[in-house]
Amino acid sequence: MQKIRILSESDIEKLFTLPMAIEAVEKAYLQKQAGSGEIWPMIFHEFEPGRADLDIKSGNLNQEEVFGLKVVSWYGANPEKKLPALFGTSLIFDIKTGAPKAVLNAGPITAYRTGAAGAIGAKYLARKDAKQLLVVGCGEIATFLIAATLITLPQIEKTVIINPWKPELAVEKLEELVTKVENLLNEAGVERHAAITAETAAEEAVRASDVILTATPSYEPLIKEEWVQPGTHFSCVGSDMTGKQEIDSSIFKNARIFGDDVSQCLCVGECEKPYKEGVFTHLDGEIGEVISGNIIGRNSEEEITIFDSTGIALQDLASAAVILKEAEKHGYGVMADI
Amino acid sequence: MQKIRILSESDIEKLFTLPMAIEAVEKAYLQKQAGSGEIWPMIFHEFEPGRADLDIKSGNLNQEEVFGLKVVSWYGANPEKKLPALFGTSLIFDIKTGAPKAVLNAGPITAYRTGAAGAIGAKYLARKDAKQLLVVGCGEIATFLIAATLITLPQIEKTVIINPWKPELAVEKLEELVTKVENLLNEAGVERHAAITAETAAEEAVRASDVILTATPSYEPLIKEEWVQPGTHFSCVGSDMTGKQEIDSSIFKNARIFGDDVSQCLCVGECEKPYKEGVFTHLDGEIGEVISGNIIGRNSEEEITIFDSTGIALQDLASAAVILKEAEKHGYGVMADI
């Protein structure tokens, strides 16, 4: 009789940390370049446009000996029923036999791996002397982006949070956000040195920042080109669907541009609109090529760099694989006959 | 805390019967026509061509209030490791909220719903006076096809099993196959009246049969056109991948042709080769249109009818939904936090 391991949200929160996520996601990007990690076609289905939709991201990761998928459903009206708007569920298989291995609540995994992705972009593309980090958006992902980037860029001295839609919201939520960042750093065993503040003036915050991470569901650019200083790095993680955009298209004009998956970036990522508008003709590469050293990331201190993180199945698979190893070692989760 | 139900192979074998599968699959076909059941793009991945592959079939079924997917992996070398070559796993969600509901071992579900599909084709397209059933192939699916068709066509007096590749194999396996058919009929509460025999001469068996069900993994036609008598009905369930073929292309020439999903039939089904060879230009419809009465199935006693059953996600979803209802009622499976 075959057995399958079920890992709940709370199991995963106990087992997973940002350093584990950062290591797993870097490995996933590298395997994508090496051809030992493959992404299968994404399925996107709208139950009711703008109200309820879903995507299925799947693929295989040979070094971790897994294949699998993640289903993420978004139901905008769920919070009225006291249910989460998002549900994420991963199903993982053994690549040696095709047997099912585990079901994981992918909600926390998505937050960790998305924070890790933005921070990896900053690690490989930001200036070495970057001192100020700006996070645009003050949802849950913002806390993961901040904590992960304070791990990958320990030289950061100041972190600023802004919310261009409702500028006061970032200020109101600051204490809650800082507590969450502290918790993520604590579980990672990392001490925080950087100050974290919230500001209401987007332009000033952008002008003063070296690294800008965007994590909003915006369909209109929130960051204007004229605010952006030479040498700024952007990791954009909010755009994951046709039509979304967080930063001015013209920022792409002379930027060095990387993505997690070129074709997905051009279809649904931050790259989509400027590419379709003809602002740039091709990405400079995928982030895995920068990590592996095949392509140079940043060429100069003045260059604008952009990492378009649309979110790929391999991040989820690599995260699930490392969580599963820990769960097996420590006996977490429910084992059920299948 | 959200909970998910895990149903094992043995849970499903206890809960599911062929009459339940037949009813579920008919409803699924009807919902496909009504637009309340949708099939999402199929994912097919080859790990090693001809040695290990996988498909993911997904969709939504609004009346049953579910969406979900089934992953079927095939690893040809597994039996050497004393593992099954096929693993099937279904993940089912609540369509009202997007929350995960259940994980099911889809192995037995696939066998039941495939048997049901072939039998439904025979129910709606065979002549009312059909007396002899022929099943081509003597694998596990053959037993489900026979039992299901003896339920949907109670007038059948004789069932013949042949195996054109190794003619003796059908004779050798007869006793085992009959026992399995008996078990399936017993759990369905149906008494068997039809004799079941195995024969070695394919031509004679085809000439004498009114209803022919094919369930082989063949890439070359096994049934010759000149053997086929007027009025014969075919349900072909074996072709589910590009290049497979069980019956002569020329049988399609003047036949009335139905499928479970027109585009899938033309891509990977029994229809693929004759369609690409130009033997016919279009299917006459989908089986759901015949069930609903929108299209007449058989026009005359002399007509050859063909039902190309490629296997669609809605069959699995409808089956999972009815199994889940029973499991909830009787408390089957393991409930785990997710």
Image (cartoon, coloured by chain):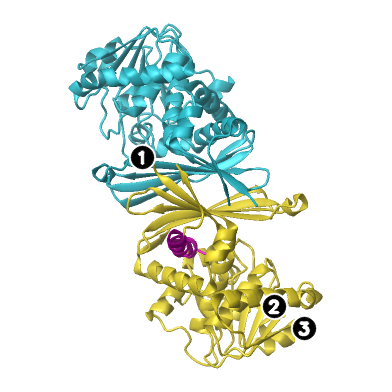
Chain colours: A yellow, B cyan
Contact between labelled residues 1 and 3, with CB atoms less than 8 Å apart: no
Q: Position of residue A12 (x, y in %)?
A: 55, 61
* Residue at the image point whose x is 70% and y is 79% from the top: A161
* Residue underneath mark 3: A201
Q: Position of residue A220 (x, y in %)?
A: 70, 69
Is any part of residue A181 visible from this angle?
yes
Q: Disc 1 on helix, strand or loop?
A: loop
Q: Which mark is residue A178?
A: 2
Q: Looking at the image, which residue is at 42% across and 78% down?
A: A291
Query: The disc labelled 3 sits on which kind of residue?
Result: Ala
Q: In the rendered view, does A152 fall on the left or right side of B34?
A: left
Q: Are marks 3 and 1 on the same chain?
A: no
Chain containing mark 1: B
What is the magenta range? A311-330
Sequence order check, earlier mark of 3 and 2: 2
For residue B163, above or below residue B67: above
Foreground: disc 3 or disc 1: 3
Separation of marks 3 and 1 at Cα, in angstroms: 58 Å
Quarter of the image for residue A76 reads: bottom right
For disc 2, the chain is: A
Q: Residue furthest front?
A: A330
Q: Are marks 3 and 2 in contact (CB under 8 Å)?
A: no
Q: For mark 2, give the secondary structure.
A: helix
Image-based side of B185 in relation to B274, left or right? right
Please name the amino acid that badge 2 sits on. Val
Q: Which residue is mark 1?
A: B241
SS class of the residue under badge 3?
A: loop
B279 or A40, nearer to the observer: A40
Q: Amino acid at mark 1?
A: Met
Q: CA distance from mark 3 to mark 2?
A: 19 Å
Looking at the rendered structure, whether the residues under marks 1 and 2 are on a common chain is answered as no
* Residue A254 picture location, percent across and down: 55, 83
